[in-house]
Image (cartoon, helix red, strand yellow):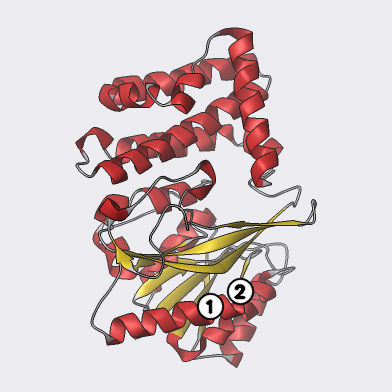
Amino acid sequence: MKLLTVTIPCYNSAAYMRHAIESLLPGGEDIEIIVVDDGSTKDNTLEIAREYEAKYPTIVRAVHQENGGHGQAVNTGLRLASGLYFKVVDSDDWADEESLKKVMTFLKDTVESGRSVDALIANYVYENQEMHKSTVIDYTSAMPVDTFFTWNDIKHFKMSQYILMHSVFYRTRLLRDINLQLPEHTFYVDNIYVYVPLPEVKVMYYLNVDFYRYFIGRNDQSVNEQVMIGRIDQQIKITKIMIDAHDLSKIKIPQLRNYMLNYLTMMMAVSSVLLIKSGVPENLDKKKELWNYLKTTNPRVYRMMKHKLLGLSMQLPGKGGRKLIVWGYQMAQKMYGFN
């Protein structure tokens, strides 16, 4: 059995997938790299995946599937994973070699000592090619470093410190036990991936290493603002799935409840800002409908969110309120370097 399975979802990724694969190979025989070709049609993605499988048959596995989107590729990787722990690395991103070695050493030592963690957290780095800027996101102020801990040990998370798909390694069995299934043909499923398992995460560990290198800056990238506005209905869909996933008012651990509430508030805020910035009048109705969905689905969580400054600001009335919302979003863009 492998220590770690890394799934690389690929869709027409021939131009950059080699970098992602090569960055993970230093994990050696303890790592399993599942390269999922999600029905690529424009290049030789599958051929490249099979090339690495032939060269590293005990490490790399090439899988072809009909196009189902990023979420379905992750589902496939999780279904086939033989590793004790599971990680997703997107095909245009990569791992830092020295950090990977430290992660693998930690996992090996943990298994040999008879312990386990439900979630391993490491830093990630925004690699903004357009701005020629690298921004490290670490968790040193929010989590104990280099020790096993629980939600009771968590401190305050800054806005920049949400646990993302880039920063988390989950125990594979945990994801299977909750039957995690991401929706097909839908963007932004990474939010479901990191949010839904959280109540089952009991033991965590934070390694202060800059493991994940997150490439941003391509015009066609899913986090590009104009692309996100064009896919706003999918953003709303993901947010509603998260609303339905858990009744946060019933979560007993205050730190976990507060963290998940802040995350959901952030998702509501992003949807609200994009709907406003689209400049399409009917999107203002969609914004109102989204907040009404939360209010009718779970009025207790709606009231909890209204007491959050971010949640309150998202509902400011009139043109002046909308301008203030957009201004706050633009400040966050400049601060954290996303596009």
Q: What element carries label 2?
A: loop
Q: Does residue 282 sit above or below 154 in this rendering?
A: above
**Horizontal side, residue 195 vs residue 114: left or right:** right
Q: What element carries label 1?
A: helix
Q: Which residue is drawn at 47% across and 90% down?
A: 29
The quarter of the rendered structure image containing the C terminus is: top right
At label 2, the amino acid type is: Asp
At label 1, the amino acid type is: Leu
Q: Which residue is drawn at 70% across and 40% down?
A: 334
**Residue 148: where, in percent of width, then height?**
31, 68
Q: Which of the 4 image quadrants contains residue 129? A: bottom right
Q: Which residue is drawn at 51% across and 41% down?
A: 159
Q: Which of the 4 image quadrants contains residue 39? A: bottom right
Q: Which of the 4 image quadrants contains residue 321? A: top right
Q: Does residue 32 sit above or below 179 in this rendering?
A: below
Read off the residue under disc 1.
100
Count neighbours of disc 2 (C-alpha within 10 A) and say few if under 14, some if 14 to 19, many if 20 or more. some
Q: Is residue 128 visible?
A: no
Count neighbours of disc 1 (C-alpha within 10 A) and say few if under 14, some if 14 to 19, many if 20 or more. many
Q: Can residue 14 be seen in this view?
A: yes
Q: Which residue is drawn at 76% across and 47% down?
A: 219
**Residue 326: where, in percent of width, then height?**
64, 24
Read off the residue under disc 2.
96
Mark 2 and mark 1 residues within 8 Å of each other at the beta carbon = yes
**Residue 44: where, in percent of width, then height?**
70, 72
**Residue 286: where, in percent of width, then height?**
51, 20
